[in-house]
Amino acid sequence: MKRLLLLLLSILIGHANLKAQVKDEGIPFIRNYGQKEYNASAQNWAAVQDHRGVMYFGNNYGVLEYDGNNWRVIILPNRTIARSLAIGKDGTIYVGGQNDFGYLSPNRQGLMEFVSLKDQIPEADRSFDDVWKTYVTSDGVYFCTVQAIYLLRNNKFDVYRLPELPWGFPFYVRNTLYVPVPEKGLYEISAGKMTLIPNSDVLKGYTITGILPHHKAGMLLVTNQGKLFAYDGYNHFTAWKLPVSPFLEEARINTVMSFSNGLAFGTAHNGLLLTDKDGTPRQHLNIEKGLQNNAVRSIYEDDAGNLWLGLNNGISYVETNSAFTHFNAYSGLPGTAYTSLLDSGKVYLGTSDGLYFKQWSNSENPIQPAPFRLVEHTQGQVYNLQKIRNRLLLAHHEGPYQVKNGVAERLSDHRGAWLFLPLKAHPDYLLCGTYNGLLLYKFEGDNLKFVRTIEGFSESSRVMEEDEAGNIWIAHGYKGIYRLKLSDDLSRAARVDFYGQASGFPSNIFINVFKINGELVFTGERGVFTYNKRTDKFEDHPVFSKLFAPDVHIRKLVEDSDGHIWFSAGKEVGVLKKKANGSFEVEKNIFNKLYDKLVGGFEHIAHYDRANMLIGTDEGFVHYHPTFRQTESTDHTFHTLIRQVSATDGATDSLISGGDFLHQGQLSISQPAGLRPELPYTFNSVKFTYSGVTFLDNDHVQYQFMLEGFDRNWSGWGTSKQKEYTNLPEGTYTFKVKARDVYGHESGETAFTFTILPAWYSTYWAKAVYFLLGLLAIWLLKRLIDRRVRLQQGQLREEQEKALRLKEAAYIEEVLKAEKEVIRLNNEKLESELEHKSKELASSAMHVMQSLETIDKVRGQLQTVMEQVEDRQALHQLRKVLRSVEEDIKVENNWDQFELHFNQLHQGFLKRLRHDFPDLTHRDIKLCAYLRMNLTSKEIASLLNLSLRGVETSRYRLRKKLNLEQEVNLTEFILKY
């Protein structure tokens, strides 16, 4: 009974989903994330999204965390692959790795980290390989390996093992876990046991890659080989066919999932295939259509209804739940978009490379799409394609053409055609605006014949409209606007009026003219205008000028069949929705995806019906489905997260928070009150990194922030994702930030509160110390003042004493000067006496020496006489005389006496000389004494009984013994010694 109810419920759900759409015109917008961008391995195995909107991917390097702007890698403890991911109702993200599994939880720094549950497994069951699948169910959490299945329930693990190995990947469908065994069939875990489902042996030899609930098949079993089976939930298995079965059998299926708009098949060789619930193909994306890899390993639908693809090389985000798709180079359509036309089951698209066409259908088979083909003879720049009187007329750089049966035929030999304008008063004629004037053509049967060039006007005619009076208004891009009145025979411009800045426009540039509800509406460099016939001037348009900002340049206005007016204004695209009362409502947020993407000056907006609209961009055409029902509208809410808070003291950066918080066991968007950090005063420069968690054109997300306690008001909107505050004073602050997405919707505020502690010199303890120091300072100041008074009194006494001492010193100085003068005079007298005695000593020495010489001569004469005397008595007397003479001539005794007096006069000169120079001989000493007495060489020679040459020789020898340099004067040395 339970299974029957579940089957009926799935059928009802499937029926409800039939209303959902898979848009198949063109190629969805795709955002590819390469390995270098997220900085991890190329291979990605799984994906989930938490309730904050943050995405997680199972990668070969661990778990990737992505908030729309910032990537983080969460490494598993054994640095292995994260094979599977699942999220519980409480927001817990479970991770299946290699020989390990667990969950993610924020650490104290607010960074997600992996927490292993392996230690809770019975020791005998702790050895296993890859955890290929993880499921969060009402029974608990299943971690599925090829050896066993581990069920975490009430903080305990139950382990299930199959009797047969190997087995395939388990799948959890309708509250039951199914385990394929290739050689047996399909098992289910029921009542705590594994049971082989009867008749499941039909699955032998197939590798099951997905089991999905299906509104017709009950359960749809998808195999890697592309074969499909229907299972009724009991014991009946039948082969099942879908319209895409041939494709699936060829492409090999890696993964499959049911999403809000149908089925998504990830293939091994041919990318992604999207079908409706019945398996009718709606989109096929591969490397040729914008994916970065053809091997899709995982598919995940996010809260915006778009798909994330984990590829064998990278990650891709596919906007399947969007009214916008592309026709560009990936569609086989090269060049920049300029013009389009839906006609007779065909679509014509004109680009800078030529005019292309294909069969058109809003339900084209994407597996075998009709290719774009180039209309013959249209290579090059296309400007306009118009259907006038059932003829396709092409305005081309090479000139005007008519398109027939896929071939362009030249209408005339003129070059540079902009567009065609039929003439209401002359229905068989039309004008062609060219680079340098106007051409006139006439309809003749099935042909269009060139008539003439309109004379009297040769300006470029790219923008033209005809008013009710038959005047032709021609806007020139940078000159102004002209009004032409053609002659009756249409041969010339009978009258040409020029209008520009002098006529009411802001300037002469960027003037355009459009026809809205039969009325000509003019736009200029800014503003919207209407022509006043009475004043022949231009005035603000009474309706449209109020719907646009006064300074915006209106580039394009196009009216559709419902009276809505589509516009390009500045860099924006939007629509003026016409209401029942005839007024207009501006709607442009939905088109913010196209901001600044239209071709400047050649904006193309073409509304064909409620399912088809084409807009030209620099990279091809964008198809917009106005009535496309998105399963999650663009009004879906999103969150802004503070992803990192760091502080610096100028030299060191410190992470304060990584932005992931756990509150009451669940991931929290807001900062819990217990996690408000207190920062030292030195770290009073704080930087915040934040992200609006939306993946739709997140480059255009804007932010507004304020720091309560510092900023007075919110900042303006900007795209910066960081804000830094430096040198914050002490205090408690709350940083608030919110985001605005590309569609103009604002997120809620998120906040982070922190405290900058006072500097050490501003704490209460420091203030108490300051108070005590103040008291001490007052006491010290009093002491200082008292001391200064005492010092001043002491200084006064000292100064008085000093003055007295100075007087005494002056008196003493006078006495000393007198005594000094007396001493000087005494010294001069002594020096004079010393000099006199030196001279007397020298004279005495000379006299003694002369006397000795005389005595010596007398002795010599006595000796001679004694030799001649023979009388003994006389000889005896002579000998006595001789002895007496010899006694008198003992020179040594006289020298000793001389030396004694000499040393007394010259402060022990000879003693010092002998002490300092012990090698000096007696003769050297005498020479030094005579030199000290300042005797001449002649006098010295006489005293030493030497010749003058002998004296010089003695002087030379004395210099050597005294070790005198050559430049030193010997006499000066002796005198100063």
Image: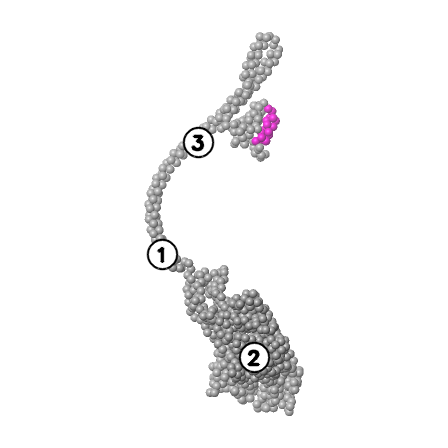
Query: How dense is the environment of label 1, judged by Cα within 10 Å: few (below 14), some, or many (20 and up)?
Result: few
Extent of the magenta region: 946-962
Confirm whether the magenta stretch covers residue 950.
yes
Upstream in sequence: badge 3 or badge 2: 2
Upstream in sequence: badge 2 or badge 1: 2
* Side of 224 where 685 appears, left or right: left
Picture residue at 58% right of the left edge, 9% below the top: 874
Confirm whether the magenta stretch covers residue 233.
no
Q: Looking at the image, which is closer to me, 832 or 687?
A: 687
Q: Is residue 539 visible?
A: no
- The residue pinned by badge 3 equals 824
Quadrant hosting residue 846: top right
- The residue pinned by badge 1 equals 771
Q: Looking at the image, which is closer to me, 622 or 908?
A: 622
Q: Main secondary structure of the magenta part?
A: helix
Upstream in sequence: badge 1 or badge 3: 1
The local secondary structure at tag 1 comes to helix
Real-space Cα distance between discs 3 and 2?
133 Å
- The residue pinned by badge 2 equals 212
Real-space Cα distance between discs 1 and 3?
71 Å
Q: Looking at the image, which is closer to me, 459 or 331?
A: 331
Expressed as whole percent of the image width and height from the top left, the position of residue 128 reads: 57, 68
The local secondary structure at tag 2 comes to strand
* Side of 589 where 436 appears, left or right: right
